[in-house]
């Protein structure tokens, strides 16, 4: 695996603001005024001791995993919530849906604030919000309180998705970021996939007390909470700015108008790119649909494996393991195509275009529909349960392959100025669809068309999206030249 380019994916994923900070008036003024005193400057995060850099890398990785486990750990408790509060399944799913929806809002708020106050303050404020709001939700005996505070937990705790990738780029060079970034890349995929399994076993251990499906998230986050006070600022611009103030005994702060403009830019640009930028919208829709299919399994797995195979919640949770194996294969596939195809183009031509990044996506484009058709028609009473379960492997494989390729492509297209907003727009669409899909899956499977054709609908829709990476491979340059934003137009 080529760690250099896997590192680029790691340090650019989700709503990572990366170097957007340099667009702020404060940091622009600072950039020309102060730099590191020497290559081995001890204040430079890349010169910190190894244990310190590993700690600052492990915290966002564990946090992201625990945060995303919280999306689906409550899924196994949905029948319990229905009985206790007398709810329909759709209403009982609201704590899951609203929590996921918060992931579309929180990073957009955290990103511009990190430009003003650095990354550490996002960590220091977001984790307490995540813990407090989740604790209130778990301690409540009122469903409205549960749903509302789960929504607030999703908003308040997801700022890590906006700044963690930037932290990795601050403290590691590109060569090392590949190894360090793998857990962070996998966290938002492994978390939701393992959440139902974790939730099911916790519920079994604690006599079906649904509150423990939330408390378990706080248990995962406990090491983060214990080490968080020892975190230091990693943002180069923030460190230099604070050192500048200290040495000059204070400096002129930004005006309120400048601060408002930074926040508006951070909030509105991803929204604009998600809706009005064709290149960003099409790629966002392509990756968001496959991501949403992983979320649709929350409903379809529960329905199919309980009605056809009579599985309990723990057995249903184990059926997600092939999806996780698919994710691991996707990381390997991305690295292989980067080494065999992309680096070969670099060596032979000396110059590459962003579309040369798309080979892995082209390979993986057919995996998701294959897996979905497989999953749609495999479940039968006379067919062993492992057959439909294994269908999750190509779905996970194709989903993460498309994601890794799309992120590196967006970074190459938009450069440091706008790639963070483009990646944020991609994350916005992913979590919006991820929040919506579980709400209607069961109704579709229970309708007159039956489980086989219900699953086939999603497979056919996925089949319609197969040409997307091919289209970008041949017509990407055309779209780049007509972008609303500055792009790589080679």
Image (tube, rainbow, N blue to C red):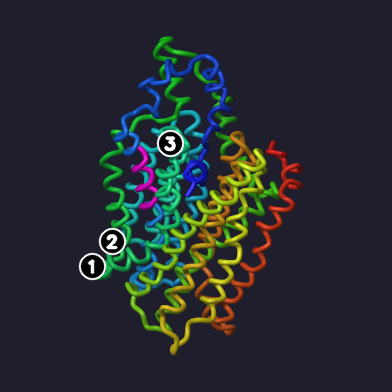
Reading the image, the residue beneath label 1 is 205
Look at the picture and state if 291 lies above or below 23.
Answer: below
Count residues near mark 2 (Cα–Cα under 10 Å), then give few for <14, some for 14-19, many for 20+. Answer: many
Label 1 CA crowd tier, 10 Å (few <14, some 14–19, many 20+)? few
Which is more foreground, mark 2 or mark 1?
1
Q: Is residue 85 visible?
A: no
What distance separates the C-alpha of mark 1 from that of mark 3? 37 Å
> Along the polypeptide, which appears first: circle 2 or circle 1?
1
Q: Position of residue 462 (x, y in %)?
A: 61, 67
As helix, strand or loop, the secondary structure at mark 1 comes to helix
Whether pointer 2 and pointer 3 mark residues with C-beta atoms closer than 8 Å, the reply is no
Q: Main secondary structure of the magenta part?
A: helix
Q: CA distance from mark 2 to mark 1?
A: 9 Å
Q: Which residues are magenta?
A: 56-66
For mark 2, give the secondary structure.
Answer: helix
Q: Pointer 2 and pointer 1: residues touching (CB < 8 Å)?
A: yes
Q: CA distance from mark 2 to mark 3?
A: 32 Å
Q: Which residue is mark 3?
A: 167
Residue 57 percent location from the top left of the image: 37, 40
Residue at image coords 43%, 10%? 248
Q: Is residue 391 left or right of residue 274?
A: left
Camera-nearest label, 1 or 3: 3
Q: Residues within 10 Å of mark 3 (few under 14, many from 20)?
A: many
Location of mark 2 (residue): 212
- Position of 234 with respect to 352 (left or right) is left
């Amino acid at each position: 695996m080529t760690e250099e380019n896997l590192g680029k994916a790691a340090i650019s994923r989700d709503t990572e603001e990366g170097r957007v900070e340099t667009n702020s008036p404060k940091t622009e003024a600072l950039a020309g005024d102060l730099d590191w005193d020497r290559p081995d400057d001890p204040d430079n995060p890349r010169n910190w001791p190894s244990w310190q850099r590993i700690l600052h890398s492990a915290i966002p990785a564990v946090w992201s995993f625990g945060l995303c486990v919280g999306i689906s750990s409550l899924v196994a408790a949905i029948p319990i919530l229905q009985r206790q509060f007398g709810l329909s399944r759709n209403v009982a799913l609201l704590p899951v849906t609203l929590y996921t929806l918060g992931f579309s809002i929180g990073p957009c708020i955290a990103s511009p604030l990190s430009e003003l106050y650095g990354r550490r303050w996002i960590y220091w404020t977001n984790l307490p919000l995540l813990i407090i709001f989740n604790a209130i939700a778990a301690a409540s005996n009122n469903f409205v309180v549960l749903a509302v505070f789960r929504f607030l937990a999703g908003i308040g705790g997801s700022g890590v998705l906006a700044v963690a990738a930037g932290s990795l780029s601050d403290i590691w060079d590109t060569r090392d970021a590949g190894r360090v970034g793998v857990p962070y890349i996998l966290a938002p995929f492994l978390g939701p996939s393992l959440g139902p399994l974790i939730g099911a076993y916790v519920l079994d251990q604690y006599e079906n007390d649904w509150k423990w499906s939330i408390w378990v998230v706080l248990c995962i986050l406990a090491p983060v909470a214990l080490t968080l006070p020892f975190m230091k600022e990693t943002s180069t611009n923030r460190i230099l700015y604070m050192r500048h103030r200290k040495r000059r005994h204070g400096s002129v702060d930004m005006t309120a108008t400048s601060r408002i403009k930074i926040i508006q830019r951070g909030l509105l640009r991803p929204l604009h790119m998600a809706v009005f930028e064709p290149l960003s919208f099409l790629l966002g829709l392509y990756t968001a649909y496959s991501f949403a299919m992983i979320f649709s399994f929350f409903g379809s797995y529960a329905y199919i494996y309980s009605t056809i195979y009579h599985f309990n919640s723990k057995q249903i949770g184990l059926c997600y393991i092939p999806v996780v194996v698919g994710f691991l294969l996707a990381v390997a596939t991305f690295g292989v195509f980067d080494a065999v195809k992309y680096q070969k183009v670099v060596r032979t031509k000396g110059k590459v275009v962003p579309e040369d990044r798309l080979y892995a996506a082209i390979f993986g484009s057919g995996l998701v529909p294959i897996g979905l058709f497989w999953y749609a028609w495999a479940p039968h009473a006379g067919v062993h349960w492992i057959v439909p379960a294994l269908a999750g492997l190509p779905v996970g494989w194709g989903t993460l392959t498309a994601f890794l390729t799309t992120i590196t492509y967006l970074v190459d297209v938009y450069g440091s100025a706008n790639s963070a907003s483009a990646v944020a727009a991609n994350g916005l669409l992913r979590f919006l669809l991820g929040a919506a899909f579980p709400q209607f899956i069961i109704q579709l499977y229970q309708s007159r068309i039956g489980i086989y054709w219900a699953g086939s609908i999603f497979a056919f829709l996925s089949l319609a999206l197969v040409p997307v990476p091919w289209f970008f491979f041949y017509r990407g340059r055309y779209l780049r030249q007509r972008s609303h934003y500055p792009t790589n137009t080679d």
